[in-house]
Amino acid sequence: MSRVIVARIVFMLAAIFVVLTALFFGIRLGVGDPTIAIQGTYATAESMQALREALGLDKPLWEQYLIYMAGLLRGDLGVSLQNGQPVLTQILAVVPYTLDLTVVGLLIGVVLGVPLGFVAAVRRNTKLDHVIRVMTLSGVSVPPFIMGYFLIIIFVIGLGLFPVAGGGELDEPLSRMRYLFLPGLSLGLIMTSYITRLARTTVLEILSKDFIRTAKAKGLDQRTILVHHVLRLSLVTIVTLVGLYATITIGSSVVIETVFSRPGVGRLIVGAVAQSDYMVVQGTIIFYAAFVGIVNLLVDLTYTIIDPRIRYE
Amino acid sequence: MSDISAAPILEVENLRTHFTTRAGLVPAVDGVSCTLRRGEVLGVVGESGCGKSVTALSILRLIPDPPGRIVGGEIRFRGTNLLDLTEEQMRSIRGNEISMIFQEPMTSLHPIMTIGSQLTETLMLHRGLSASGAWDRAVEMLRLVRIPEPERRVSEYPHQMSGGMRQRVMIAMALSCDPKILIADEPTTALDVTIQAQILTLMRELQEKLGTATMLITHDMGVVAETAHRVAVMYAGKIVEEASVQDLFAAPCHPYTRGLLASIPRLEASSVAAGAERARLKEIPGLVPSLVNLPRGCAFAPRCTYASERCRREQPVLEAIRPDHRTACWEASQLATEAA
Ligand SMILES: Nc1ncnc2c1ncn2[C@@H]1O[C@H](COP(=O)(O)OP(=O)(O)O)[C@@H](O)[C@H]1O
Ligand code: SF4
Ligand SMILES: [Mg+2]
């Protein structure tokens, strides 16, 4: 078991290394000199050269790379090219907001999506199934920013219930929740759509299996079959794919954080890209890679609990 | 061996089960009549796709609807037409009075439930046993089907067992409530040859010991010869010949039955009846017909060497050619005299 965890972590680190290396060179060769972006129209040749030296950008690329990697090993993600603040500090300041958002989004997605998908599968081809299908289809096809604006129109402009922008104070749970409500619901509804579809397909597939026929031939009723034979097994598949969906939450959360002007890793990366702040972009990518890796690790651990076929030696 | 003249426990009469598919209406079972008597083993044989499984599933009313439906006939179990029962009444029969073993031991057990919990489910449901009482009975059943170390095996999962072991579990599960009827749908087809023999021996011994009336579905005439008392031969959704095993092997009347017998490699009995045809009929020539567009007359006509104009025009009906020996073929009496 622990060997699998170690292997997972090693794999995750290797993946981060590869992505980071590609990003490091790609960004520098592709985008070029960030000093113009930083100093804007007031830049002079001398001031730009001075900045380059201050940021270490005058050194050969491979040397910059080694310096960056050496820093990483010490837990140093470097400093922002824009404001000179340590990248790690900047990321850590907004991580709680992003975690709030993704955890709530996934939670809403699972809590609503699994039962909806179940019902849709069991009542396949009835009106209820069609209604659920249309709802989820809109959920996955509507872009996240439309979903966000939609909720803003209803809850903020229409009902005047929630604050529209910002993230609230981290140490005030109530304000944090008030600010989380709309973004969390936006992401939650998107995740609900994905998970409903997934749950429906999974349950339908299980219902067509030979062992369900066996269960019927034993004289079991529909309810027993659904609860004892279908539900737990469907969770095995759903848990795996929810792990995969962690990547969808990243994409959507970036957009949602922007729509709601909410602090978060997504908005940090968008700002950094706009300003050619390489260092912050690299740091946030490390965060995302680690996030996906950890979610997958949790998925593996959950497996061992719910699926007896998987036993790690 | 059981008393062949015993009273019927299951009478299937003119059963018709149809499927609606994109290609058209599939009359998978189209007028099947057969009788299962107390304590006997009725072999049901026929090539793949002739409607054996659909017949079996119809008896338990487990045809998936859609696409399938039982559109006609009667299935009388101890005099009661099962087709008249409510779904709830039917559930109290399934796994209790009539139980079934399937062809696919690898996929017929739930992958993430222990053998024990799968066995106890039926016992608690139909027998009202307590959890621990059912567990003890489950272990006892595993011992009955000769699974070694049943106390340990009962808490294992299917993936920890071989195909043969899983089929033993299926047999244990099917027999655990002392059913009156066991339907075994090709129980050994998916297994290795040596395992096949072991499972068949086990089933034969249990059948003799418990006297459970058994419908043994197979496409293998060899299995029928070794296990069944009577045989019903199916072709394209109909029964084309029905007789005692001895009669059928000694004097098969339907050309299709003869073809099947000739295709068994090692059986002495068949060489008597079908010796002349052996060389030609290694495999019955021609294809199993598509059920969507069956010919108007005898469904076997396109593959039959005896087919006449009448065969292509009129459908033969199942009629007694001798006492306790029925067949559906226009040329049957001629073939019967020929064989005799
Ligand atoms: N679920 C189904 N949907 C459509 N057609 C079916 C279905 N099940 C069986 N059939 C049709 O019924 C016919 C008989 O099938 P089956 O009873 O399984 O044959 P076998 O004798 O091999 O057991 C086949 O030709 C098949 O096309
Ligand atoms: S009825 Fe005619 S075609 Fe059909 S099996 Fe008999 S001889 Fe052959
Ligand atoms: Mg079959």
Image (cartoon, coloured by chain):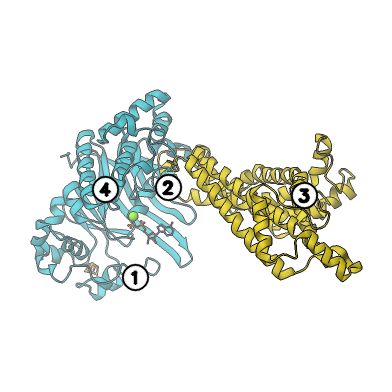
Chain colours: A yellow, B cyan
Q: Which residue is mark 2?
A: B62
Q: Residue at x 22, y 38 (%)?
A: B207
Mark 1–mark 4 contact, CB under 8 Å? no
Secondary structure at numbered mark 2? loop
Ligand 2 found in image quarter: bottom left
Disc 2 or 1, which lies upstream in sequence? 2
Q: Would you place residue B258 above or below residue B59 in this image?
A: below
Along the horizontal axis of the image, is A237 left or right of A25? left
Secondary structure at numbered mark 3? loop
- The CA distance from mark 2 to mark 3 is 67 Å
Q: Which mark is residue A86?
A: 3
In the image, the residue with mark 1 has its CB under 8 Å from the nearest atom of ligand 2: no
Label 1 sits on what residue type? Answer: Arg
- The CA distance from mark 2 to mark 1 is 30 Å
Q: Quadrant of residue B19?
A: bottom left
Q: Nearer the viewer, mark 1 or mark 4?
A: 4
Disc 1 or 4, which lies upstream in sequence? 4
Q: Chain of mark 2?
A: B
Q: Nearer the viewer, residue A274 or B6?
A: A274
Q: Which residue is mark 4?
A: B216
Where is residue A210? Give x, y as percent. 42, 49
Label 4 sits on what residue type? Answer: Leu
Secondary structure at numbered mark 1? loop
> Which residue is the extreme one toward the bottom?
B309
Q: Quadrant of residue A178?
A: top right
Is residue A194 visible in this depiction of the protein?
A: no
Q: Chain of mark 3?
A: A
Q: Which mark is residue A164?
A: none
